[in-house]
Amino acid sequence: MDPRGGAVEAATDGDGRFVADAVDAGLHRVRARPDNETNRLGAYWGDSWGFCSGRTVELEVDDDLDGVIIELPVGGSLTGVVQDHDGAPLALAEVSAVGLDFYNATVTRHGVADSDGRFEIAGLDSLVVDGEPVPGHYRIEARSVGSAPWYAPGAPWSRRRPSPRTPARRLDRVAEATARL
């Protein structure tokens, strides 16, 4: 909420504690974002997913703010197998889930296929509308070393932007996908 659009970043230690220094006076919101390997979702202080519903605090010059606790909810996951055109598993293929809807536009998570081509991508978000979970909307990408990316449900992706008619993959809390390269 800094009128200049500034932000201060801090990393947590092994116990989840953090210190943010050099915070200007004014209104602020505190947000936590997990790393790609953690099956958790980002949240604002006040246990809120959305910016506007996050708790605000007004700081004066030289104020300290203690006791900020943000609980990050567990995310959904996507599991699947990456295979070549002959159905053989592709080890070490990189798989990504890229958020496409308004609420997940900043979410990109990655996984790497094991020797059997199996992968898991964790930390995927969904929405709650009228008390019911609504799956997030993601584009699933897979690529092996030296190849162009392929996108679920199995069509190669050109450099052009997707058509609104392009099929999209909507994920339930746990989903399965198969990609062939």
Image (cartoon, rainbow, N blue to C red):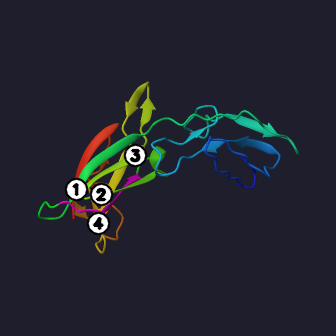
Q: Amino acid at mark 1?
A: Asp
CA gap, disc 3 and disc 4:
23 Å
Q: Which mark is residue 122?
A: 3
Dots 1, 2 in contact, CB < 8 A: yes
Q: Estimate how packed mark 4 is, as few (under 14), some (14 to 19) or many (20 or more) residues with alpha carbons within 10 Å.
A: some
Q: Nearer the viewer, mark 3 or mark 4?
A: 3
Towards the viewer: 110 or 107: 110
The quadrant holding residue 53 is top right
Towards the viewer: 10 or 156: 10
Q: Nearer the viewer, mark 3 or mark 1?
A: 1
SS state under label 1: loop
Residue marked by disc 2: 113
Q: Earlier in the sequence, mark 3 or mark 2?
A: 2
Residue marked by disc 1: 116
Q: Is residue 163 visible?
A: no
Towards the viewer: 100 or 120: 120
Q: Amino acid at mark 3?
A: Ala
